[in-house]
């Protein structure tokens, strides 16, 4: 999944759940995406942090948030 696809999926999930904070939206997006993407995103995040081990789901959530915040750009 590309970064742009992550951003679109996150945005659609946020539209469906406007009352949630960003971390909760990322977690919900990942639950809907499935275990394969959770594993992929966690491995990307751990590679970015240069770590060999980490909790799977929180690492995947961190990756989604990192992508969303990076593509979103600086705050005005």
Image (cartoon, helix red, strand yellow):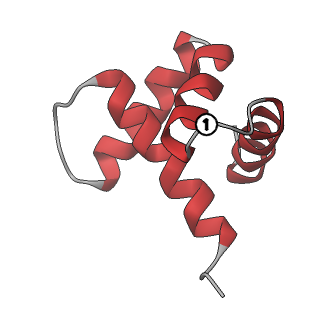
- Residue projecting furthest to the front: 19
User: Looking at the picture, how far across and down is residue 10, in whole percent?
Assistant: 71, 41
Q: Residue furthest bottom?
A: 76
Task: Determine the secondary structure under disc 1.
Answer: loop
For image coordinates 81% across by 45% down, the residue present is: 8
9 or 13: nearer the viewer: 13
Write the residue at 61% across / 81% down.
Answer: 75
Callout 1 environment at 10 Å: few (<14), some (14 to 19), or many (20+)? Answer: some
Q: From the viewer's side, name the closer residue of 62 and 47.
A: 62
From this view, report whether residue 69 is shown above or below residue 49: below
Query: Quarter holding the N terminus?
Result: top right
Q: Residue at x 66, y 67 (%)?
A: 71
Image spot of residue 47 (x, y percent): 31, 47
The quarter of the image holding the C terminus is bottom right
Residue 53 in which image quadrant: top left
Residue lying at 33% horizontally and 54% vertically, measured from the top left: 48
23, 44: nearer the viewer:
23
Q: Position of residue 43 (x, y in %)?
A: 37, 34
Q: Which residue is mark 1?
A: 20
């Amino acid at each position: 999944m590309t970064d742009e696809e992550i951003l679109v999926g996150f945005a659609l999930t946020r539209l469906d759940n406007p009352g949630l904070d960003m971390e909760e939206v990322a977690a919900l997006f990942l639950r809907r995406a499935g275990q394969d993407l959770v594993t992929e995103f966690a491995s990307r995040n751990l590679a970015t942090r240069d770590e060999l081990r980490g909790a799977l789901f929180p690492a995947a959530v961190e990756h989604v948030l990192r992508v969303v915040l990076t593509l979103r750009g600086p705050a005005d």
